[in-house]
Amino acid sequence: MQWESVIGLEIHAQLSTRSKIFSASATAYGAPPNTQANLVDLAYPGVLPVLNAEAVRMAVKFGLAINARVARRSVFARKNYFYPDLPKGYQISQYELPIVAGGAIDILLEDGSLRRIGVTRAHLEEDAGKSMHEGLAGLTAVDLNRAGTPLIEIVSEPHMRSAKEAVAYLKKVHTLVRYLGICDGNMQEGSLRCDANVSVRPQGIGRLGTRTETKNLNSFRYVERAINFEIARQIELLESGGRVVQETRLYDSERGETRSMRSKEEANDYRYFPDPDLLPLEIDQPYVDAVAATLPELPDQKAQRLMDEYGLSGYDAGVLTASAELADYFEVVARGLSASDVKEHAKVAANAVMGELAGLLNRDGVEIGGSRVRPASLTALLRRVLDDTISGKIAKDVLEAMWDEGREADAIIDARGLTQITDEAAIERAIDAALAANPKQLADYRAGKDKLFGFFIGQVMKATGGKANPARLNVLLKRKLAQG
Amino acid sequence: MSRGVSDLHLADVAQLSAQLQSGQLSSVELTQALLARIEQHQRELNAFITISADSALQEAARADERRRHGTAGALTGIPIAHKDIFCTAGEKTTCGSRMLADFVSPYDATVVQRLRAAGAVMLGKTNMDEFAMGSSNESSHFGPVRNPWNPARVPGGSSGGSAAAVAARLVPAATATDTGGSIRQPAALCGVTGIKPTYGRVSRYGMVAFASSLDQGGLITRSAHDAALLLAQMAGFDERDSTSVELPVPDYAASLEQPLKGLKVGVLREFFDGLDEAIEPLIRAALALLHAQGAVIREVSLPHLPLSVPVYYVVAPAECSSNLARFDGVRYGYRCEAPRDLTDLYQRSRAHGFGAEVKRRIMIGTYVLSAGYYDAYYLKAQQVRALISRDFEQAFHEVDVLVGPTTPTTAFELGAKTHDPVTMYLNDIYTIGANLAGLPAISVPCGFVGGLPAGLQIIGPHFCEARLLNVAHRYQRETDWHQRAPRGFL
Amino acid sequence: MSIEHSDVESIARLARLALTAEEIPQSAQELARILGMVEQLKRADTAGVTPMSHPLPGQRQRLRTDAVTETDQHELYQRNAPQVQAGLYLVPRVVE
């Protein structure tokens, strides 16, 4: 039996406003418990919510960026349930009339093709506080600093067909909200959280299977693993004659499994109704137009432009536009390398940024903003490769030295004497010496062991400290060996 | 002629203001006199939950200080009481409930702030039906309030304590709240004046919520003139309340004397259904008096108005079931002993913290919002609400105000209606409509039946408080019902 | 109009109100009585009528400037708390 998996994601993004959505408390992460929770956040008797203008603007920005409809009129609704981190006993959210509806996000698949993932809706709501269950015997501790932080909940259509697609979509949303400056995307701190709705059905069947919801997946890796686990679990269940129960599950990252949430005796009836303390949110066209005017170049637009202007492949453009800052860095480097036709050396710049530089960023766990090598400095290094001063291989070491020591390329090349040897006479002398020092290998080569060519290359490189120009060396060694 | 200290309780706000301003009287003297009266009658009436003697005297002393410096205003030093539903920093706010029996608010309600800024001196927090749910003040955790006109009878509710305190001349004025009639009905039953302003006129910030789209803060006083003086201070836009309206507050006192000639008064056919036949002549007499002043009386009909009680008993419980979910024993308020687990903590704290009527309304509210019932009940009720509002709107195209009885009966006996919730709910039959439509309404005393007061209700279009106070004032100029005090409290 | 005991139990659970076995029948009766009164609503013809959530027509939500104006007052606010430790509110352990 061939199975198809159907996946939808609900992503909660914390909006990076200064104050909370319905109160003027700070939203900064990491404050001591309950020091950023005022009377409104604590749901004291008699308090009332007032809506944050910036949260609205950010939601509209998001809607525009995904080509969705921005509702002229949207309504806040109460979602009623009891939980210690939900002080009012209800969450203020949006139900029947969300601020954003429709829209789509394009994702690049591994084979280079594009898939359009529909977005059903995005709405504004408030975050709950945090419950902590560890460390206190028989007790749960509640910190309400986070209660009231503004969220947009982004609900996708069930258009994804694999865990990889789901991760690609999640990454795209992650990139998009950072481009828009509406969310810092820090999954560790919970700025971006994801719930995955997963079901399976036999290939070719139109009707959807029963789905489960797996909550609070806070890394790309966990999302992928949890979804794959769920798919496998459901398939196994169905193949052995069982039925999938519609339920909420949690991902156990230690075991790599999802498990059912025990606390639900019956499905929660949230009894949504329009919040009487808040009036309908009305948004007119001039407002929408004003927000539209503030949209930055979006990831897809930037990627297309990089492809058009710099002749990059779709894949490279996709990697470089993962963040606006990374793309900007690349552009400075590429433009620095070629005064007239930026396409000429764009690939060199792209490879360096995506390859060696990315390696150093990963090694030190920093984003491009924390790069210890400025774009102009990288440009200078790459010029030394292009003008044959050093080989690409040497350049990798130089870059690392630039990063660690904070010095420019030329300084390091000079100090370490890394300038390539291009002088043919010098290379020939080195070749002669290598051949003379290894008569057995020479004889074997002459006898037909062609592979030993590489051995001699290695010997000359060793003798010259890696500085022999590889192309010249290749030509000259061939000539010498052919000679006799 | 100055009054002796023993008569201070008979002076109203306007008169006291004059006496304080002229120096005939000090705030401290006045406050002491009224505190003594409150103590004297507390056992018999139970109108107060908290008597704030120390802080009141301090505030009075400060008021006298300001007067000495010439920085006093018209309300400086005027003693008032606050219904115990308004948060008062440093003093208990109980909402008449065990759930908040020991709760001390860290902040002041906007209404409290504004009246304090105007110089009013708070003598205490008045008793009320628990969480404002009731029409008799019998559901308070702190015991029932008794009607000063007849202690075997209810004062009305939920603002029973405020109404009784003002009627018994313990304070000249008290704040109150009205969700389905909780200012007007007790005012009528206690022979005093009560005004519920337009929805959004008075800030709800700090007024513990019962039904958010219906609740409104207002006043119980002994005259329309007094209400005009105090309402002008209470009312006005508050940025902390999203439903607060950004309209300037008129000088209500300035238009009190407007002649009523040409005023179009509508009399609702529906208001005479179910009315005690002894009250009807009092209403007719009041209408005749308005007519004599030049008002034109016309009959109007609000065909959907009879459905206002069922609408209310869907919408108000729905909203309250949600508003009261915050009372869970976690951050403040009553917590049960030795909770076994979280569910037990919630269930027992709430079961013990709340009284029977509150629990009943939470249950109804939860039911009408729940899956499968929302459309049939809640949605339907909000649609009928729209129809009722539309009826009022159309009526106000033809008339300027609507006049009728405030309540179907005079004060009933304690315990008479507690056996059946629906019987109790029908007390609100004439008052609920104004809450559903967000309209301002005032009740003034209009006579007596068997020694018990009856009330005349005047309802107007949105934000016409000035007109309501004007009509009420002109009526009070021609009558003395509002000056009658119950025996034993003279 | 009648309410089943099981309905009463479900509602009480949703509302987190403990009800003893003795209280359930009375609660069912009272709810039925109130809902019976409410049944009158069916009489109204509400076809095409927009439900009214707010009593004043044409009101729209005001927006607040995004600024932090609150300071840390947790000590004051936690004076009312039944159980607090190290600034955290404590409740019986929640089992997920």
Image: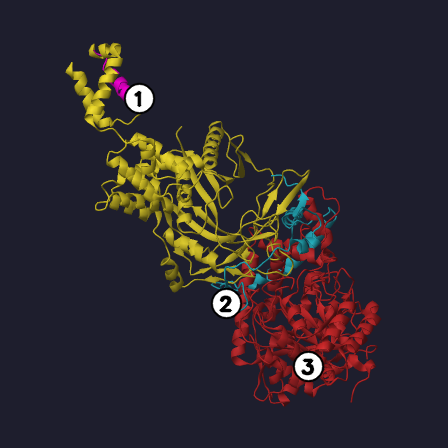
Chain colours: A yellow, B red, C cyan
Q: Amino acid at mark 1?
A: Lys
Q: Circle 3 sits in a helix, a strand or a loop, which is it? A: loop
Label 2: chain letter = C
Q: Which residue is mark 3?
A: B70
For the residues beneath circles 3 and 2, the answer to whether they share a chain is no
> What is the magenta range?
A448-462
Q: Label the magenta part by its dominant secondary structure.
A: helix
For the residues beneath circles 1 and 3, the answer to whether they share a chain is no
Q: Which residue is mark 2?
A: C59
Label 3: chain letter = B
On the rendered structure, is A243 left or right of A338?
right
On the rendered structure, is B88 left or right of A341?
right
Q: Which residue is mark 1?
A: A462
Q: Position of residue A43 (x, y in %)?
A: 62, 55
Q: Nearer the viewer, residue B394 or A469?
A: A469
The answer to whether B243 is drawn above or below residue A463 in the figure is below
Which of the 4 image quadrants contains residue B10? bottom right
